[in-house]
Image: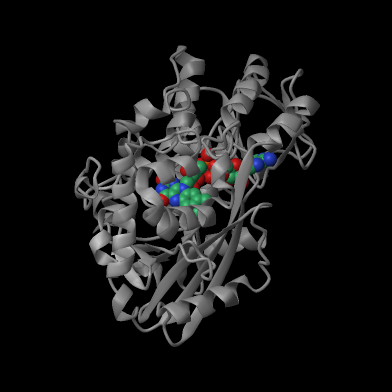
Amino acid sequence: MSRRLHDARRYWGSSIPQTSKSTLTRHTLTTTVDYLVIGAGPTGLGAAQRLAEAGADFRLLERQPVPGGLAASFGHDGFTWDVGGHVIFSHYPAYDAMLAAVIDADDWVHHPRRAYVHCAGAWVPYPFQNHLDALPAAAARRCRDGLAALVAAGIAPDRSSFDAYIRTTFGDGIAELFMQPYNRKVWSHPLERMSTQWLGERVAPPSSDESRPARSPKTWGPNSEFRFPCRGGTGAIWRSLASRLPPSRLEFGAAVVRVRAAERVAETADGRRFRYRHLLSTMPLTHLVRQCGFAGLSDLAGKLAHAAVDVIGIGFEGAPPAPIGEHSWMYFPDHDCPFYRATVFSNYSDHNAPPGCWSLLLEVSHSAHRPRDTHRLAADCLDACRRLGLAGDAVRSSWHYRAEHGYPVPTLDRDHILDAARGELEPLGIFSRGRFGAWKYEVGNMDHSYMQGREVVERWLLGSAETTIDHPALVNGR
Ligand SMILES: Cc1cc2nc3c(=O)[nH]c(=O)nc-3n(C[C@H](O)[C@H](O)[C@H](O)COP(=O)(O)OP(=O)(O)OC[C@H]3O[C@@H](n4cnc5c(N)ncnc54)[C@H](O)[C@@H]3O)c2cc1C
């Protein structure tokens, strides 16, 4: 048994699904199925659940020993960690129904959002642009002057790039104090090369008293209130869903290494072959086209941009320091602080930390545009926590996880690349979906991913249209 599987079983016990691998002979060279799913993250599990409901002939292959993908959770020294604090958003009744089926109503903790931006030495409630009064007077004036200058010049939001949009929507003050430095940290990518069609519900407009139409700042956005599994982190959702699916259909520790597209065969690292009629892949699209051996498409897909995320969990003894005692999460635009976001993860559930302890979950992004020496990252993060007054005295435990694919960056040329990839793959029965399968950040959350999996199955089974991947604005406007 691998170390990760052993650790996972120790922490999550029977909620780790049994792999069906032991029931297969290693010498079974080719297995034939109607539907093959690669990956047991939210997308793959959404598809598998829908296929199981329909009684379809399918197999799901996951290279890791546990389900959940980026939405998995990990236990370490009595602390529970997510790959960055996951908050549940939902745009779909079917997603709500799944959540209700896999976690009992009493096993959720409900929270109001208490999110802040640390800026100019102050804690500014999120959304920043709606709470300029919380800034020191000079900084607030700079932000208001920037907004007033836009109005005086009659400037309308320019959507030609994310950077242009920030400047023409929020003005120079908000742009320079928060929007630009923060977004450069998260995306690790030049904002001038990013598009704006993903913005929708992700970025709040400034308040009317700052010159633009307002929505109620406290309740702005889809996560003004959120809930979290009482035990086992976000991954509890996906472990529970996986454990309700037919075990003979799921294989963990089964990495697909090659897809013979013309033959409709996928090969695993241990030499087995799976012949399929329809394939759903949730691995990064760039990996899929390489595995298919499509040279031209690989070169094109190589232009898709992403940011890696290092997630660092620090478990402290005692209680969180007063200023952040009740905070949910905090944003850090300053360039001398390595992380862009910190979550007081023990505030999400008492069970996320052992008795008498609390926990901070820190996220650091990097890419070729913004390389980082990750060797000293955990130490640098702890130093920054101490400098900012976020740290407790005694560190009980620390945890470090690298997500090589963290954020799919919405670049200006992205949709052209994605259209070309779908045009080549889908006639061959290959459907690439999910956060990095579809590479669309605007539909890259858990609810979107789960539904991308279900919708592609309904397209196969019923011929229905896929809404999430094709109409993100419609879905997010719900
Ligand atoms: C830092 C961070 C914070 C986030 N916060 C939130 C949040 O607050 N709310 C929210 O809703 N969402 C959040 N998300 C997004 C959420 O994690 C994703 O929506 C979701 O995990 C995507 O599911 P997926 O199945 O498409 O992909 P993944 O979760 O990446 O799953 C893909 C699976 O495929 C497997 N795989 C890959 N290659 C192979 C192969 N060759 N063979 C077999 N298996 C393979 C992987 O091991 C993985 O298990 C966050 C993500 C990150 C990185």
- Quadrant for residue 228, please give it: bottom left
Q: Quadrant of the N terminus?
A: bottom right
Image coordinates of residue 253 in percent, x first then y, are 66, 47
Q: Residue at x 59, y 39 (%)?
A: 39
Choose between 278 and 413: the one closer to the eye. 413
The residue positioned farthest toward the top in the image shown:
463
Nearest the viewer among 289 and 277 is 289
* Residue furthest front as drawn: 153
Q: What percent of the width, then of the height, locates residue 306?
A: 61, 45
Q: Is residue 417 visible?
A: yes
Left or right, 63 with respect to 461, comes to: right
**Quadrant the C terminus occupies:** top left
Q: Position of residue 450 (x, y in %)?
A: 44, 36
In this picture, residue 351 sits left or right of residue 17:
left
Which residue is found at the position 22% from the left and 43% from the top?
Answer: 214
- The correct choice, above or below, for 245 with respect to 167 in the image is above
Residue at left offset 58%, top offset 53% = 188
Residue 141 picture quarter: bottom left
Res 388 quadrant in image: bottom left
Say which residue appears at 42% left-offset and 45% top-offset: 166
Is 170 left or right of 267, judged from the image as shown?
A: left
Residue 293 point in image, percent of width and height: 79, 29
